[in-house]
Image (cartoon, coloured by chain):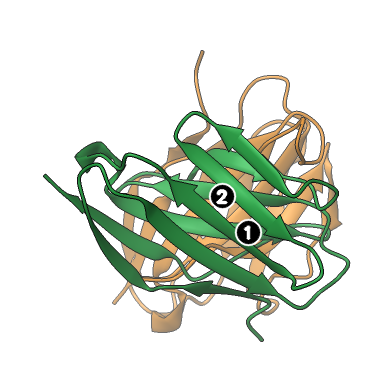
Chain colours: A green, B orange
Amino acid sequence: QQQVKQSPQSLIVQKGGISIINCAYENTAFDYFPWYQQFPGKGPALLIAIRPDVSEKKEGRFTISFNKSAKQFSLHIMDSQPGDSATYFCAARQRALTFGSGTRLQVQP
Amino acid sequence: GAGVSQTPSNKVTEKGKYVELRCDPISGHTALYWYRQSLGQGPEFLIYFQGTGAADDSGLPNDRFFAVRPEGSVSTLKIQRTERGDSAVYLCASSLMGQGVNSPLHFGNGTRLTVT
């Protein structure tokens, strides 16, 4: 049972553009929603996280938008750079983190 | 400072063999997690330790999988009678206390297990 659904599976964006990745969940017991970035051969690294009592959180070029009523949250990467090319995972926590299936982002120069 | 260290980085074993995967968490982190990541998928939770005890082992797929953390620091994931379906990257993560906004998970680079 996939508790966190992530889309799209892959994404190609031009340098300077906006990358948007979406996630949806069903379990209302989730209380913490992080996004992780993973490069090939490396473990996931925390990018940004949000609690469900907040609708938006911004850190530099990265923004999480959270819609509690729709049970959806998204990651926006502004001014996307080639160095942002990686796989991105959304996650949600009840006891342990449940991860989405990932989005492979490619930022073209 | 040092991050989460996992050894070996790669392990190739034959079907039916026993393997041990080691995780050295960040010093002072009381919480330790094991995840499994199959190719093209997100990490899948296996087990969570708070100190020496397994606080949640609901993700272990069957009784061939077992993990220990005897002194509340280093952890070992043990897989008996390995099967080809066990092939994946096994990730270890640690956090200061549980995990949340103020205590994020720090992942190691994983052990890539291949069962032939």
Residue B98, image x, y percentages: 81, 40
- Under mark 2, the amino acid is Trp
Residue B87, image x, y percentages: 39, 72
Chain of the residue displaying label 2? A
Depth check: give the residue in front, A28 or B29.
A28
Secondary structure of residue under mark 2:
strand
Secondary structure of residue under mark 1:
strand
Residue B1, image x, y percentages: 51, 13
Question: Which circle's residue, 1 or 2, is located before the other in the chain?
Answer: 2
Residue at image point 33% right, 74% down: B14
Both labels 1 and 2 in a single chain: yes
**View extreme (left): residue:** A109
What residue sits right under mark 1 in the picture?
Answer: A91
- Answer whether residue B21 is visible to the viewer in this image: no
Residue at image point 32% right, 39% down: A79
Residue at image point 57% right, 59% down: A74
Crowding around mark 1 (Cα neighbors within 10 Å: few <14, some 14 to 19, many 20+) is many
Q: Is residue B115 above or below residue B32?
A: below
Q: State the mark number for residue B80.
A: none
Chain of the residue displaying label 1? A
What residue sits right under mark 2 in the picture?
Answer: A35
Q: Is residue B4 above or below residue A26?
A: above
Residue at image point 20% right, 44% down: A15
Distance (Cα) linking label 1 and label 2: 6 Å
State yes or no: discs 1 and 2 in contact (Cβ < 8 Å): yes
**View extreme (top): residue:** B1
In the picture, measured across the screen, residue A74 lies left or right of residue A78, that is right
In the picture, measured across the screen, residue B47 lies left or right of residue A87, that is right
